[in-house]
Each structure stands twice: as structure tokens, then as C-alpha cells.
Image (cartoon, grey):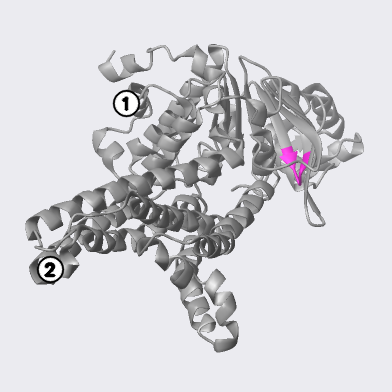
């Protein structure tokens, strides 16, 4: 008997067989699905590479005012905030496009738990990515050592808001993936719809609505300064439209539809 | 144990599964036979909770599938071998599922070995797999959680003859150790050799159900004569309907002795007379599922 065949005789924990997989375990599995496919792997390697390139470029060509930690961080997070939502989309839509949904849902028949694990995994991914961006930005600032007062100052509140901005962006991707259950349309629409809406919002008559619902306005503040109460209300309204609504539509479709 | 009772599924105005009932007992292999589009896949999807029945109920191990706490550890399922993420490596496809159901990762290596996917194959992305390799990966996936029940949809599809023989051995062994197996096929010979019980479905309805011997008993007699037309006439005269098997023989829905007597009475010399066996089963399968004779 080979070593591998012997592995089949390792007794499995009987305890596990009659217990639901924990949310932690499901989240870990979803995190794994984000990086173990060709598309997921390259997307994330691209984010890492671009982050380093952007920060390096500011080190070389940037003005001293661009080299403060706060400015570095804002630049460093940009590649992640553009590309990681695609990882969020694919995490859901590829289950349909690649037809793995039946496998996923026979292992975890509670479909809501699967979607919850995907959201949780997206938040974890965002936090890891944010910490990475922060580290790269800090190295960039250290290398440049701009002789400016408060070059290293960064409020905890702003730090939290930036992380929140990234995380909600990735979860919005999950929402688009879930609402459309198809990779290409979800990716295209997640770029086109907000841009189109921003264009429409520039029409004077719609300007008041745009202030509450256009992410390019209401959410852009998150990385700039600490939000006022009104600004939080605007950001919350925007999230209700762009994040909560697609997720709700997605959940409804996933619960209602036949799988496979 | 698998139990389907009055399972019914409609898509719009079409009833694709109509009042389907059967039971699969531990220690047995059940062949689920029917032509493409007969409702096999839909029935199996209802068994594992992916599709909601419009009527009837489906139980696996004494309850609805979706109520199993960690189903992968009790039931191994292969519904569509080609449905694997094309950009994921073979080993990784197993590893993710092993992680989800809480199975020791070393078991992944053991199963890759068992299904004959070597290190090079396990490292390849599923995109590069042939259908046969995907079936092997799918069977490894089904066995991952050390299940008590296997539900396999067309697992022999794409396997070469040695692969089919290997799969029969795996399934026989699984059942002999007390497992319950339900496997579907649209080809009789794929399941005939391994199944203890056959469930034949056509146009969404159960057409026949029983052990091979039980089904064969009603499959009739195969007779040959140099003068086939005379044989048919003699059988007609004796009141037995017969039909040609397309290969110079006739299949008669009667016992061999009755056929022999009819031939004697008609003065026809027989060159062959025997229970129809597999040929009859094939014919029975064909008749039942095309609805030519009901």
C-alpha cells in the first residue's frame, strides 16, 4: 500500500460529520476560491504590482506634498479599489459561469450561509489588502522622507474610513455578481452604471439626487476627510442603492432559482 | 438509503418528472436508466436539494438532503463532471471541498491516487482535462467525505472501457461495504453489469423497476429460424405477438417451451431458442423508454 493509499485509511473526525461547517471555515474556503483560480491569482498579483509601481512612481517623480503618508496611502489604495471589486464579482458569478454552483450548494445547502461567507471573505480580503497598501505607503514615505510637518500624520478615523471605502467597494462587487449571476455583464455594469449615473447626475435638475446616490461624490469623501453627519447619511444612502440593493436582489435570486 | 416518493417536477406546462418513486437500500447499487431527457438528472437534482419538487418528497439517509448538517460527509454527489472551474487545478478542486467539509487534506492525495490521476494530472488546470479525467476527478470528489451514499449522474460518460471497468469495481466495493449507490445512465450495458436493481424511466415516468432477474423474466424468448416469415406466421397462428430484433431473430413475449410448440405446430424448424437475456433487456429498455409499447 502506497503512502497515498494509506491516507484513505486516516479516520475522519466523526464529530465533524454531524456538525455544520462553521462560518469561519466557509469564509476560509471562499478566501481560497478567490486566489486559487487563474483569474483570481493574476488579478491579485496585478494589484500588488500596481500598488508598488504607483508608490514607487510618487517616490521618484512626486512633489514633497504628494509624499506624505496620507497622500501615499490614497494613491496606494487606488489599484485595489478598482480591481478587487472584480474579485468580489467573480467570487459569486464564476460559480454560475464556471458551473461550480451545484458543487458549492450540495456541500452547503443553506444558500444564505454561502452568500454570507462570500461577503465575509470579501471583507477579510479588503482588510488584508488595505494593510498591505498601508505598509507599501509607509515604506514609500520613509524612502522619500518629505521634509514637511506632519508627513507621517494620519488620523485613525480617516484610516478607518479608507478601509471601509475599500471593503464596501469589494462587497458591492459581490452584490453585482449575485444580482447578475454572470461574470461579463456584472463586470461591465459595475463600471458602466456608476459612471453613467455620475454623468446623468451632472444634469443640473438631478444634482440634489446625485449628491445622495452618486458614489463618485458621496463616497469619494471617505478617503479625503472625516465625514460629517450629513455626509454619513449620504454615504449610507448611496450604499443602500449600490450595495444593499444588488445584494438583496442576488440573495433573492439565489434562494429562489434552481441551481445548476 | 435513498427514498423518492411521488417526485414530480414541472417546467412550465411540461411535466419532466412525473410521480417517480423508488428506494435504494444500503449495500446495493441501483442503476437509474433512461434515454437523454427522460428526467434522470432532474430527479437526482431534487434528491440533493438543488431543485424543488412540485410534488412528492425526496429523502436521503432518513430526511431531506438539505437538513443534513454536513452533507458532504454523508453523501457523495457527482452531477455533471464537466462542471468544474476551468481555471482551477485538479488537486485544488478537491482541496477546496475538503476544506469546506472538514476533511483531512491528506485524503485528497489518496483519492487522486485511487482514481488514477497522477501528480502531473493533478497539477493541471481542469480546462486541460479530457472528459474521462473530469469523470475521475468527479468520482474522487464524490468519495472525498467518506460518504455512506453515492449519487452519480452518468459517471461512465467519457470513460474508456478500462475506466468503466475500474468504476464498476469501485462502486461494487463501495456497496459491498454497506454503501448505497444510485447511478444513472442512458446506456443499459454501462449499468447492467454492476446494478443489483434497475429503475427504468422514460418521459418522466417510471417504466419498470426491479432486479435484473425480475426484469429479464418478463423479457421473453429469442428464437431464430431460417425462414423467419414462416416463424412469425406460426407464432401469429398460436396467438403470440413477435417482433424482429433487427438481426434475423424474433423476440416473443412467451416462454421458450410455448414458442417451441408454436413452431412445431406451424412446421417451422428452429435454429435457436432461448430466453432472450440481455438482448431482451435491451429491447425491453428500448420499448419502455420510447413508449412504443406501454
Image disc number at residue A64: 2
Q: Is residue B255 above or below residue A126?
A: above
Place of residue A26 in the rendered image (x, y in percent of width and height, measured from the top left) = 47, 34
| Number of other residues with Cα within 10 Å of mark 1, as a class: few under 14, some 14 to 19, many 20 or more | many
Report the magenta residues as a range. Answer: B201-205
Magenta region's main secondary structure? strand
* Relative side of B230 to B128, left or right: right
B61 within the magenta span: no
* Relative side of A18 to B4, left or right: left
Can residue A124 be seen here? yes
* Relative side of A186 to B213, left or right: left
At a point 87% along the width and 35% down the height, the residue shown is B240
Place of residue A7 in the rendered image (x, y in percent of width and height, measured from the top left) = 33, 17
Q: Do discs 2 and 1 belong to a common subunit?
A: no
Q: Chain of mark 2?
A: A
Compare residues A191 and B118 and report the one nearer the observer. Answer: A191
Q: Label 2 to label 1, Cα distance in Å?
A: 55 Å
According to the picture, the residue beneath numbered tag 1 turns out to be B109
Can residue B129 be seen here? no
| Number of other residues with Cα within 10 Å of mark 2, as a class: few under 14, some 14 to 19, many 20 or more | some
Amino acid at each position: 500500500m502506497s503512502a497515498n493509499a494509506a491516507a484513505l485509511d486516516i479516520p475522519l473526525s466523526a464529530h465533524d460529520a454531524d456538525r455544520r461547517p462553521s462560518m469561519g471555515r466557509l469564509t476560509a474556503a471562499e478566501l481560497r476560491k478567490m486566489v486559487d483560480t487563474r483569474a483570481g491569482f493574476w488579478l491579485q498579483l496585478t494589484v500588488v504590482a500596481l500598488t508598488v509601481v504607483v508608490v514607487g512612481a510618487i517616490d521618484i517623480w512626486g512633489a514633497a506634498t504628494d509624499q506624505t503618508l496620507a497622500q501615499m496611502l490614497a494613491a496606494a489604495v487606488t489599484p485595489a479599489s478598482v480591481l478587487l471589486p472584480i474579485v468580489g464579482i467573480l467570487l459569486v458569478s464564476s460559480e454560475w459561469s464556471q458551473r461550480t454552483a451545484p458543487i458549492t450548494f450540495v456541500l452547503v445547502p443553506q444558500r444564505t450561509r454561502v452568500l454570507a461567507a462570500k461577503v465575509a471573505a470579501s471583507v477579510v480580503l479588503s482588510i488584508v489588502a488595505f494593510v498591505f497598501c498601508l505598509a507599501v505607503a509607509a515604506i514609500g514615505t520613509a524612502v522619500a522622507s518629505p521634509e514637511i510637518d506632519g508627513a507621517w500624520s494620519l488620523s485613525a478615523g480617516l484610516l478607518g474610513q479608507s478601509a471601509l471605502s475599500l471593503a464596501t467597494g469589494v462587497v458591492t462587487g459581490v452584490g453585482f455578481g449575485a444580482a447578475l449571476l454572470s461574470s461579463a455583464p456584472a463586470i461591465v455594469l459595475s463600471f458602466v452604471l456608476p459612471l453613467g449615473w455620475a454623468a446623468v447626475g451632472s444634469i443640473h435638475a438631478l444634482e440634489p439626487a446625485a449628491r445622495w446616490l452618486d458614489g463618485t461624490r458621496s463616497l469619494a469623501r471617505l478617503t479625503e476627510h472625516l465625514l460629517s453627519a450629513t455626509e454619513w447619511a449620504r454615504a449610507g444612502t448611496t450604499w443602500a442603492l449600490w450595495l444593499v440593493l444588488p445584494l438583496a436582489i442576488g440573495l433573492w435570486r439565489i434562494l429562489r432559482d434552481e441551481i445548476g | 438509503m435513498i427514498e423518492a416518493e411521488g417526485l414530480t417536477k414541472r417546467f412550465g406546462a411540461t411535466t419532466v418528472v412525473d410521480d417517480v418513486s423508488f428506494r435504494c437500500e444500503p449495500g446495493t447499487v441501483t442503476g437509474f436508466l433512461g434515454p437523454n431527457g427522460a428526467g434522470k438528472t432532474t430527479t437526482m437534482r431534487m434528491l440533493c436539494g438543488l431543485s424543488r419538487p412540485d410534488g412528492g418528497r425526496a429523502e436521503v439517509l432518513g430526511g431531506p438532503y438539505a437538513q443534513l448538517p454536513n452533507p458532504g460527509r454523508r453523501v457523495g454527489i457527482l452531477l455533471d463532471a464537466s462542471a468544474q472551474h476551468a481555471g482551477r487545478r485538479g488537486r485544488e478542486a478537491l482541496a477546496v471541498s475538503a476544506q469546506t467539509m472538514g476533511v483531512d487534506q491528506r485524503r485528497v492525495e489518496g483519492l487522486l491516487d485511487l482514481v488514477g490521476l497522477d501528480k502531473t494530472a493533478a497539477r493541471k488546470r481542469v480546462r486541460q482535462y479530457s472528459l474521462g479525467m473530469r469523470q475521475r476527478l468527479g468520482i474522487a470528489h464524490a468519495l472525498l467525505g467518506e460518504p455512506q451514499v453515492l449519487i452519480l449522474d452518468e459517471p461512465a460518460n467519457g470513460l474508456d472501457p478500462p475506466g468503466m471497468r475500474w468504476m464498476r469495481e469501485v462502486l461494487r466495493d463501495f456497496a459491498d461495504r454497506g454503501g448505497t449507490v444510485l447511478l444513472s445512465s442512458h446506456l443499459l450495458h454501462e449499468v447492467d453489469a454492476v446494478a443489483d436493481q434497475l429503475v427504468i424511466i422514460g418521459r418522466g415516468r417510471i417504466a419498470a423497476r426491479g432486479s435484473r432477474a425480475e426484469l429479464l423474466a418478463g423479457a421473453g424468448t429469442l428464437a431464430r429460424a431460417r425462414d423467419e416469415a414462416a416463424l412469425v406466421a406460426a407464432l401469429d397462428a398460436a396467438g403470440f405477438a413477435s417482433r424482429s430484433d433487427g438481426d434475423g431473430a424474433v423476440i416473443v413475449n412467451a416462454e421458450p417451451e410455448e414458442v417451441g410448440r408454436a413452431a412445431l405446430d406451424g412446421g417451422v424448424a428452429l435454429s435457436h431458442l432461448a430466453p432472450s437475456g440481455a438482448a431482451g433487456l435491451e429491447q425491453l429498455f428500448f420499448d419502455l423508454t420510447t413508449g412504443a409499447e406501454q
